[in-house]
Image: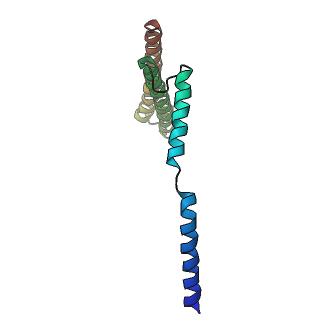
Amino acid sequence: MNKIKLSFAALVAVVGVSTALPVLAPQTAQAQSAASEITKGVNQVGGDTNTVTLQERIKTITNILLFVLGAIAVIVIVIGGIRYATSNGDASQTKAAKDTILYAVVGLVVAIIAYAIVQFVLTAFKVK
């Protein structure tokens, strides 16, 4: 009796999958034509989707680098604070922790100055 139930369940599964396959098949031709229509419309109104200027790329890269450097500086400052709190009054460990915090802050200031310089240069030499 169990073999009959198992065979019937397998038959139902095969029939169900075979009838659902045409429904589940991707409609790539329609998706590609819709994407090309959207791209054509964007290009008609003057917005070429594939054009990114060098200045925009440089701005994006500097924004990402500044974010990453800021995050790293915060992590290093927290590590320096933990080292300072766990130094137990040892002069060498306290000095090392203070130096860690100082170097993180100096690095963050240098990164912000570099970001400002890059932004100034990009706006000064903007191609129109």
Where residue 121 sits: x, y (%)?
43, 10
Q: Quadrant of the N terminus?
A: bottom right
Total residue callouts: 0
75 or 15, nearer to the observer = 15
Q: Is residue 75 left or right of residue 19?
A: left
Q: Is residue 100 left or right of residue 17?
A: left
39 or 90, nearer to the observer = 39
Look at the picture and state if 109 lies above or below 96: above
| Residue 102 seen anywhere in this rendered image of the structure | no
The chosen color scheme is rainbow
2 or 111, nearer to the observer = 2
Rendered image quadrant of residue 94: top left
Where residue 86 sits: x, y (%)?
49, 41
| Residue 65 seen anywhere in this rendered image of the structure | yes
Image point (41%, 19%), residue name: 54
Where residue 52 sits: x, y (%)?
45, 22
Task: Farthest residue to the top: give it.
Answer: 124
Task: Farthest residue to the bottom: give it.
Answer: 1
Where residue 65 sits: x, y (%)?
44, 27
Image point (44%, 25%), residue name: 61
Look at the picture and state if 39 lies above or below 19: above
